[in-house]
Image: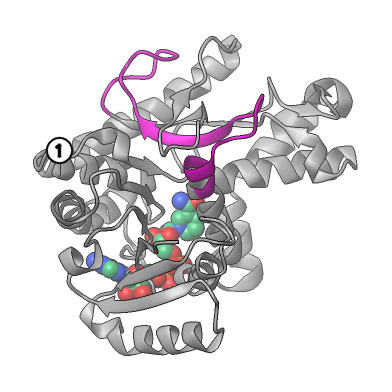
Amino acid sequence: MRPITVSITGAAGNIGYALLPRIASGAVFGPDQPVVLKLLEIEPAMKALDGVAMELYDCAPPLLHDVVCTSDPEEAFGDAQAVFMVGAMPRGPGMERSDLLRANGPIFTGQGAAIAKAAAKDVRAVVVGNPANTNCLIAIHAAKKHGLGPEHFTAMTRLDMNRATAQLALKAKAPIRDVSHMIIWGNHSNTMVPDTTHARIYGMPAGDVINDAAWLKDSFSPTVQTRGKAIIDARGKSSAKSAAHAAIEHMRQLWVGTEPGSWTSIAVYSTGKHYGIPEGIVYSVPVTCPGDGSYRVVEGLACSAEVKALMKVSADELVSEREAVQSLL
Ligand code: NAX
């Protein structure tokens, strides 16, 4: 089988370290699909990246066809069919969210343009680096200027969906595989809306099985919304394995499709046609994926007045993030 080219930015970071061996082992593109991995880092991290590449070879993954380490985005994205945009500047002490947006913006203008110029025409890119939704929007605008459409870019809220799914399973004492149809609406931030309205446990409405409305409102949602901080407090480091796994599942479902009758949550460019979500922001919605790299927003789901109000708060936050980076769009 011909190898496919997969690019990973920030490949020497924590998530990259957890992500690379799994991509090279077939977790995303299947057990028979050879891969060429193109790894992008900034200059100061190139030595560390060499170490990561050495370890990758030391796993001797049979599907690993070649590894390219570079600090040149166009080289990194050359012919890429799948791109994991993980690299971003971390939030430093005293930095506001808007400072982080402005600091990361230029990374995503440059990389969005480089993807449009150098990657395969059917490329799919997932943005993991925070603030993921608006970084994705910046990349979309940059790519559009070079003729690549917004449907090629999505941002990751799969980790939030996985966190929510596992919390429901733990509460119901159910196997995780028996929990489905969780939805994350909105921004990958504390305003995200973990919506259990349509979630099922053993195929039944999750709310009926759990039968504890106060827990769902007062414990479940805050636990999911602040899980990233809880991991940092406990581990002293931010989520890496779970984030890498979520990125793998996000890309795998775009690549091979969602299971019939199920959906996943992905942040996508809003066309303004679904659920009152404003046009021109990157907003997490339930989607189905046919398995050709595309996605379809699940339409017609009922949303309570409470969920709608929370969805608007998250949309308003994304609109204000867009305003903060307007000069880059
Ligand atoms: P690390 O700081 O360990 O790694 C980031 C890497 O990106 C570093 O090696 C750095 O040199 C590199 N980098 C910085 N600027 C770059 C550029 N212009 N081009 C290429 N590489 C560049 O962070 P890590 O823990 O790996 O997290 C990566 C990103 O994921 C962060 O922005 C983080 O906030 C975000 N996350 C997003 C999540 C999500 O659900 N969407 C959850 C996990 C994670 O917090």
Most frequent secondary structure within the magenta stretch: loop
Q: Where is residue 188 in the image (x, y as percent from the top left)?
A: 46, 43
What residue is rendered at 32% in x and 19% in y? 278
Q: Is residue 10 above or below residue 327?
A: below
Image quarter hosting the C terminus? top left
Please tell me whether residue 266 belongs to the stretch shown in magenta: yes
Q: Name the residue under label 1.
A: 144
Residue 261, given in percent of the width and then of the height, sits at: 66, 24
Mark 1 surroundings within 10 Å by alpha-carbon count, few (fewer than 14), some (14 through 19), many (20 or more): some
Q: Is 325 inside the magenta-drawn segment?
A: no
4 relative to 211 in the view: left or right = left
Q: Which residue is drawn at 58% across and 73% down?
A: 236
The residue range painted magenta reads 252-280
Q: Which residue is drawn at 26% across and 34% down?
A: 150
Q: In which quarter of the image is the N terminus?
A: bottom left
**Residue type at the position of mark 1:** Lys
Residue 12 visible, this angle? no
Q: Residue furthest right?
A: 173
Residue 59: image quadrant is bottom right
Ligand 1 quadrant in view: bottom left
